[in-house]
Image (cartoon, grey):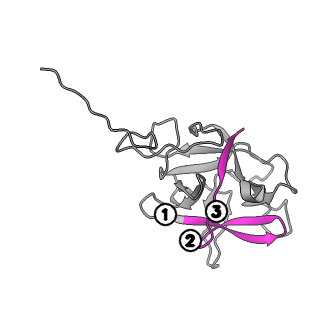
Amino acid sequence: MISFLLIAITPSGAVAGEKEVVLDSGGQPVRANAPYYIWKPEERAWISRYGNRTLSPFSCPRRVVLFSNAIVETPPPVIFVLLSSSDDVVRVSTELNIKFARRFFCRDESGYWRVANSSLPIKDVVLSGSKSSYDSTFTIQKSVNGSYKFAFGSADKPIDIGLDGIYPGISRLVLSNTSSFGVSFIPA
């Protein structure tokens, strides 16, 4: 007796039952543990790092920010670290850690993104997270016009990451369901 395995392909090219692959700016799958620049095309801005105080770029630990292209020309690349998958590509809604590919001079900075545990109403994304810690768990979600957005927390209850302007050309990444923003990923 011969049995057949039937695999359904969706219009987006994903196998039924699997999450959609996140694509880079060239239409290729975003790879886990590979460096990427994060770009917000409509504002010509990059994800980077900045000091923890508003006008103190060298204070530690630093936070994750969106810099306009006029301020930073070569941003530091990030790496996506999958939490529970042996897959080598990043998929939409897959839980992961995000870290900058290179560490800088801050001793108490791990490079892993983390949502700060703060009593303040605005919770920054800072760089003192750790691998596999709940406060360092993010997902990448589909946004509008083929772009992607970041969300914090588990895949079943994500909270969008938004922007909060702190200085002309600099916005910090914060926990916010009202100000999400679309990005694309450029291989480093």
Judge depth for marks 3 and 2 and give the one in front: 3
Q: Amino acid at mark 2?
A: Asn
CA separation in Å, label 3 and label 1: 15 Å
Residue shown at 18% from the left, 25% from the top: 3
Q: Which residue is mark 2?
A: 177
Residue 141 in the image, given as x and y percentages of width and height: 53, 55
Mark yes or no: residue 133 visible: yes
Q: Amino acid at mark 3?
A: Phe
- 10 Å crowding of disc 1: few (<14), some (14-19), many (20+): some
Residue 167 in the image, given as x and y percentages of width and height: 83, 70
Q: Which residue is mark 1?
A: 158
Residue 10 in the image, given as x and y percentages of width and height: 39, 43
Q: Is residue 134 shown in magenta?
A: no
* Side of 65 where 1 appears, left or right: left
Residue shown at 57% from the left, 42% from the top: 23
Counting residues from the start of the chain, the first of labels 1 and 2 encountered is 1
Residue 117 in the image, given as x and y percentages of width and height: 60, 69
* Side of 137 where 3 appears, left or right: left
- 10 Å crowding of disc 2: few (<14), some (14-19), many (20+): few
Q: Which residue is mark 3?
A: 181
Residue shown at 75% from the left, 66% from the top: 171
The image shows residue 13, relative to residue 158, as above or below, that is above
